[in-house]
Image (cartoon, grey):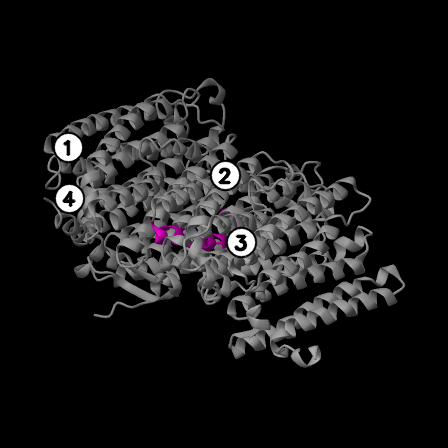
Amino acid sequence: MNYESWALTAAVFLPMAGALVLMLWPKESEIGIKSVALLVTLLTAGVGVYLLVQFDYGASDKLQFVVNRPWIDVINSRYHVGIDGISLPLLALSMLISALCVIYSWDHFPEPRNPKAFLILLLVLETGMNGTFVSQDLILFFVFFELVLLPMYFMIGVWGGENRQYASIKFFLFTLFGSALMILGFLALYFKAGQTFDIPELINNGSAIARGTQLLIFGGLFMGFAIKVPMFPFHTWLPDAHTEAPTVGSVILAAILLKLGTYGFIRIALPILPEAAHAWAPWIGLLSVIGIIYGALGCLAQTDLKRLIAFSSVAHMGFVMLGISTLTSYGINAAVFGMVAHGLITGMLFFLAGSIHERFHTRELSRLGGLLVQAPKLGWILGFCAMASLGLPGLAGFWGEFPAILSAYNPAHGLSLPMFRTFMVIASIGTVLAAGYLLWMFQRTAFGTPKEEFANAHIHDVHGPEWLAWAPMLALIVALGVAPGLLFNVTDSAVQSVSAALAAVAH
Amino acid sequence: MLLAVFRAPYIDYHALAPEIVLTSTIIVILLVDLLIAREDQKVLVTNLAGIGVLASLVPILTLAVDGTDRSMFGGAYVVDNFSLLLKALFFVVGYVVLLMSTRYIEEGDYYEGEFAFLVLSSLLGMVVMSSARDLISIFVALELLSLPAYMLAGWRKRDLRSNEAALKYYLLGVLSSAVMLYGMSLIFGVTGTTVLPEIAGKLAGAETAPVVTVGIFFIIVGFAFKVSAVPFHFWAPDTYEGAPTPVTAFLSVASKTGGFVALFQLVFIAFPGQSAVWGPLFWVLAALSMTVGNLIALRQTNIVRMLAYSSIAQAGYIMVPFAVAGANARALDTAKTASIVYLLIYAAMNLGAFAVVIAVARKTRSGEISSYGGLMSYAPGLCVLMTFFVFSLAGIPPLGGWFAKFYIFLAVLRAGTPSAVVLGVITAVNSVIALFYYAGIAREMWMSPAPDGDVSPIRIPAPLAAALGICAVSVVAIGVYPQVFARLGDLASLAR
């Protein structure tokens, strides 16, 4: 079967082309700028629909829509793109969220407005995110992985909250530090595994690398990806960045950017360096469960709604990483599901936090209350998302969290059983804490009567653009919760091939 | 009798055509400057100089198409891919500097005709340097490129800081020439020849004599002054700040590249077998330059001083491939390409940054970083360009600088020795430190309000806009499709 197609190239570069068009667009015609951005993201999402329809689900472990052309010959790096069952859902998620972010920002431009610059950055971000998910060449991956840094830096730094400058540079420095070590790891792979940056080829050659070298290279990749995820103890950039970013920035950070890290583990680190993955797995598992508990406790200590959601990301990404650290197809499937679910749910929560902040001009939990009285629809959506986030069966969050915990019961051959079962127990405690902080958050914001200062304020309920932006996400949260097979069936055979590469070296 | 013995050396006029065109231009503009009486017409001189530089590129192209390596004067003067590429680079850099200085010099009420004359003379030195494969030619080329630069640094002659800049630059430059010349004399004493490949032949095989070690050490230290490597960098920040900004751009790009070209030829052509001597030396220079340059740059509030320290750090990056080149034959090849690729990309991004500094100073009349506040609101185009240039210097994809840094890492890991890997990690950490001050400029431009609330737009003269355009297009093109430039670097590294 011939899978060659330029659809992925369109998916990656349409937003960039849109950004170029916007640069030339006169600043005064705001409506034109918004329309172009919307059109471009919708077109890109249309390409996404085409991909979803044309994707051969029977062969989701194979790369499809492949283009493999020379790019930088001198270092044998190629423009090699393609998607399999792991990339497809994340790519689709990225396209969906980007389009929804444009819709949401239609009349929600944070100060200092300047929709032109804001939307250009958003489109550049989309190119970077889409590109990362389709790259099958390490250098191409690296370029796209880094491409998201600049727009996000400016998005936080220019349109963010009070502490934005500190948060933006912290985000930038942390990520750059990780990626500097990551690129050293990539180069080491190049020299040790056949002078190529091609990911499928490296997966073939990688297991031949000596164990000691594998461990070191994995360390470099680990730093790059773990900071992006972020795993404890590299998470400290996240609460600041998420809290200070404008709403759309937080949504994209939570929904997509964090996934670049976990995706990197599944796509690159694990299959190329299986032996090192086995050696590192217990540590990754340990850091994951620390992250779960630490994130949950962090949530309980927050007084700011947005910061609380930010900390909950640390905990949720802990579950994803726990699933990955078991090195089983069960765990990795759960991880991919967890990535998508977290993207939808936490993305929604950040949208909600943004809308609440816009209405009350505060995110202090102690000043909020009675949302259900003043804006019942907004309140119920918040409740719905809190339930989804704490892993209520029947909603998407459950299928990310529960199988991840369960997978730790039976980790890959060669990993310490007692250790991972301990992780499992600790992670389950984490879900209890999650229920605690989410319900507590919901109760503080939505129940009771409005505080005196807002008693007579007129609070809008959910309005048009918000409905448009949120409805697809809410629908997907329910759909994936009721029929998780929709996603598991896509990812499974691709995940199987990853775990097969891992199992091949198990002792 | 003597006349009978003397045979005129073979001169290949095609090979020398770029130098001949440039020299003719120099003479012409000197005469034209003399004949034009009115001060307000002096801009004609600069325009003529620009045309002359562009005309010099034509024979470079014909030579490149021809493609044969040409050697003259007993191997002392060689025209090959390496020298052609660097000559082309110098011409383009020279042209961009002329574009940048067109209005700057005129509006500052400085002598414009002589300015162009001196820039071109210095340029001639660099062009000669690209072909010099002989200790004496190298020395002559170095003096030819340095002496006009000393004068240019002091061009604002009524400004004390400019005087200081010129004097410091001159004194330390002469000192370094003396040190270098002493090293060269030692090498000549041992080998009995001044032609680089012959030196390599004489030194090959034998145990490195102590006197050779001392000679190489002095030569490299001499050039370390020129390229402002730590701990020989003290002149650079004061000189850069005091000199007129276009001159600073010229010094920090062209003059520095000239120094590296000489180092490249000496190290890789004359002393390839002595890596035990220069390897560790470059290791220390590179590590110190990167770390000290970046750490001090963090503390700067003046953008030109900051760029001065940043260019010290950049010199450190360029020396990394030199430090690891000795590990094995393949590492040597990669290191050669890496250093040339870095020089090419560095020229585009650093010149671009200076062009923005000149443009902004037209309005703010200030070099303080705080004066960049609010640039996004009143000059979004300049702001975006400056963002490109500084983040390219920081090495963030997809801007050109990433590929330069990447190639350095490639050279480091191809060498693969523990000391090389340690240097690689130092480079990686330094990239992160550097980001902090580069991002500081971006923060000021994007996130701070205009300091005095003055948001009138900046008028950019056409030549300056052209300079900005050339640099910006290069930076983005290299970043997105590095293949072309890497190929050039690859070709050039075949220098013999």
Q: Residues within 10 Å of mark 3 (few under 14, many from 20)?
A: many
| Chain to which mark 2 belongs | B
Name the residue carrying label 4.
A328
Amino acid under disc 4: Thr
Location of the N terminus of chain A by quadrant is: bottom left
Circle 2 SS class? helix
| Label ID, residue A33 | 3
Of A410 and B289, nearer the camera is B289
Q: Main secondary structure of the magenta part?
A: helix
Q: Is residue B398 magenta?
A: yes
Q: Nearer the viewer, mark 3 or mark 2?
A: 2
Q: Quadrant of residue A322?
A: top left
The three-letter amino acid code for the residue at tag 1 is Phe
Q: Which amino acid, by three-letter code, is at mark 3?
A: Ile
Confirm whether circles 4 and 3 share one chain: yes
The tally of labels here is 4
Label 4: chain?
Answer: A
Which residue is painted at 51% across and 46% down in the image? B316
Kindly identify which residue carries mark 2.
B291
Residues drawn in magenta: B392-416
Q: Decide which of B290, B370 is in the foreground and name it.
A: B290
Packing grade of label 1 (10 A; few <14, some 14-19, many >=20) is many
Whole-Å distance between the Cαs marked 4 and 1? Answer: 12 Å
Foreground residue among A422 and B237: B237
Q: What label does residue A420 carry, if any? A: 1
- CB atoms of marks 4 and 2 within 8 Å: no
